[in-house]
Amino acid sequence: MSARELTEYEEYSREVYDRKGTDAPKFQVKSGLTPEIISTISDEKRDPDWMRAFRLQSLEIYERTALPTWGYPLDGLDMANIVTYVRPDARQSHDWDTVPDEIKNTFEALGIPEAERTGLAGVGAQYDSEVVYHSIKQEVADLGVVYTDMDSALRGEYAEMVREHFMKLLPATEHKFLALHGAVWSGGSFVYVPDGVAVDIPLQSYFRFNAAGAGQFEHTLIILGKNASLHFIEGCSAPKYNVANLHAGCVELYVGEGSRLRYSTIENWSRNMYNLNSKRATVERGGTIEWVSGSFGSHTSFLYPMSILRGDDARCEYTGITFAGAGQELDTGTQVAHIGRNTSSRISAKSISKNGGKSTFRGGITVSENAEGSRISVSCDSLMLDSESRSDTVPVIDVRCDDTDIGYEAKIGRISEQSIYYLMSRGLSENDAKGMIVGGFAEPISKELPLEYAVEMNRLISLEITGGVS
Amino acid sequence: MTKPLLDVRNLHVNVGEKLILRGLNLTVNAGETHVIMGQNGSGKSTLAAAIMGSPMFDVSDGTVEFLGEDITRLSPDKRAKLGVFLSFQNPEEIPGVTVENFLRAAVGAVTGETPRLFKFQKELFAKMDELGLDRVYASRELNVGFSGGEKKKTEILQLLMLNPKLAILDEADSGLDVDAVRVVSDGINKYRNADNAMLIITHNQRLVDDIKVDYVHVLDDKHITLTGGAELISRIADGGFAAVHGDITE
């Protein structure tokens, strides 16, 4: 295939994600961070008093907290230049037809309303700092399921529940970007599934980031009562700019006794994004958290969803894939804390690096003194597509209980020239052969995704392989 | 006269500094079956790989022509599209890719048109039945966890589905029991016709017992030292390569 064909493919296909909307925001704060800017955000959002105080306190924590000392450098990120709040020129709507055309066109190009028509229980769409669209199927709402934007949740019927849980799992003191989140967060979703309710079809939130040099700080809070179940999907993308953008979202998941929550993410931020996101779940007795995570975009990512297996017999599964292309430094992984007895975790992580991309997997496991009978299985598999790329795995294991069964397996390899030759001898071009091998490598992850996301993931992989000219 | 299917002229092949083939000549016409015999390490597999275009070998001199076109520098996929096929001695395992999806993509790549799912599946199952390959293998990951015999049958399945002009079979019978060898030779006989040709690489005679062979070449000292008819096979089987050593023609 000639270089020209590759370039056209790249331009054509990446354009769907990288294109910026042409709408002008309704309101945005000045760049940088001061108590005045934080108060302006509170004013704009008509925060309750406790949230107003919470934001200012978080700002104080932010100011006295140092940058993380692990992971890839964050030199390209200058907080003085980040705009923390950008309100689109749209009121939140429950009717797709009333969403402004410019914003609607962006989401339509990404296939969002189409996804809703083809089998979701509810959809939320956030544009820059605010949610512009939220809907839930009536039959799901009738079961008592709440799916709403966080602003409404802060003031509505569940205000007390939100206050009790907000940044309790992930406190502002944990690291600098959580403190930042506490100060400037906006947007995101609140979900509550009552006892005994199983939501059979997924809920989905899509985060689209349009403004240049801005930050997105959405907060997702999901609470499952006892014996409930839910599949929640989040998708993320943003157009490409030459200035750094920052995403420091926060996801807090509370899984009640005997409940099951699956949280799936396909993240495809543009290559100027610093994705410093925090996610954590706590699981009560007999409950299950399943993370499915695909990280394709961003310039730099720090992302380690954590599962706290608090109750006896609680379980977690983490299935993740990271694809680092040219110029990308993706530091991902997962953490599990085994606290209850007979808790189990199964971690399966894959990473692919290409054209000098760097990928690091961190697996952090702690088993407390009382977590007798815990079972842990970690498998981590890295594939490098060329000799310039880099892949590391960093296991951190702290076991304080003798009665623990732990298996940890890590493999790092380069894509096999012989395998590429074998497929090419059957007529596949070099790119198609590599795409097939990488797609097969990713298959254990893609089969965990809902069909349309698996299709999107395969599309992103073939885009990475065939459009790899930088 | 029509152009030969395969015309190898003065072929020199290196792996790194090491010369494996030196001045090898070979011509294969449509409708012919050729057998290449030779001791282990004589360069038989290197010849197969050089015709297919393996990147692990370096053609330092000479040419490979296919239907009159010089393919010496073509990538393996372009050779496959022209009609060259190699059944691998050690087929690669490709995790996460099913036999069916792989073969459908391969047929699409070679013919330029991805076959319709239902029609393709029907043909695939029919060929699998002929080869005694359980249909569940269509949804197994390509060669992953396959026994030696299953791998070889899957190579023959690919041969039948892709229907190339030239099939090179590199040790298609190694590691197979008697019944499996018969299945493979049956498959080969189903493939062959007046318009295509075969180049069979083997160091034992079992596979070619049931196949009509036109020419036998002995590969020794980095080139073909002897060419004869099917009778060479039994002479080598009975007396080893020493039995034919005095017949050297080149």
Image: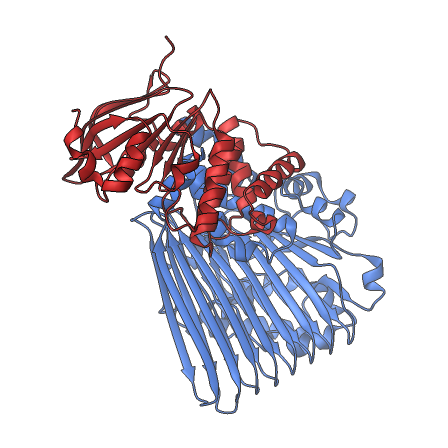
Chain colours: A blue, B red
Question: Is residue A398 found left or right of A314 in the rendered image?
Answer: left
Question: Is residue B193 found left or right of A310 in the rendered image?
Answer: left
Which quadrant of the figure contains the N terminus of chain B? top left
Does residue A406 lie above or below B54 as drawn?
below
Could you say which is closer to the camera, residue B59 or residue A204? B59
Is any atom of residue B228 visible in this view? yes
Question: Is residue A362 found left or right of B190 in the rendered image?
Answer: left
Does residue B35 lie above or below A46 as drawn?
above
Could you say which is closer to the camera, residue A279 or residue B210? B210
Question: Is residue A297 found left or right of A119 in the rendered image?
Answer: left
Position of residue A118 measured from the top left corner of the image (x, y, whole percent):
74, 48
Residue at 17% x, 39% y: name it. B242
Is any atom of residue A11 visible in this view? no
Could you say which is closer to the camera, residue A357 or residue A458? A458
Position of residue B163 measured from the top left corner of the image (x, y, whole percent):
50, 29
Which quadrant of the figure contains the C terminus of chain B? top left
Residue at 69% x, 75% y: name it. A259
Q: Which quadrant holds residue A311?
A: bottom right
Task: Tell how many labels.
Answer: 0
Could you say which is closer to the camera, residue A188 or residue B86? B86
Does residue A294 lie above or below A159 as drawn?
above
Position of residue A4 measured from the top left corner of the image (x, y, whole percent):
41, 27
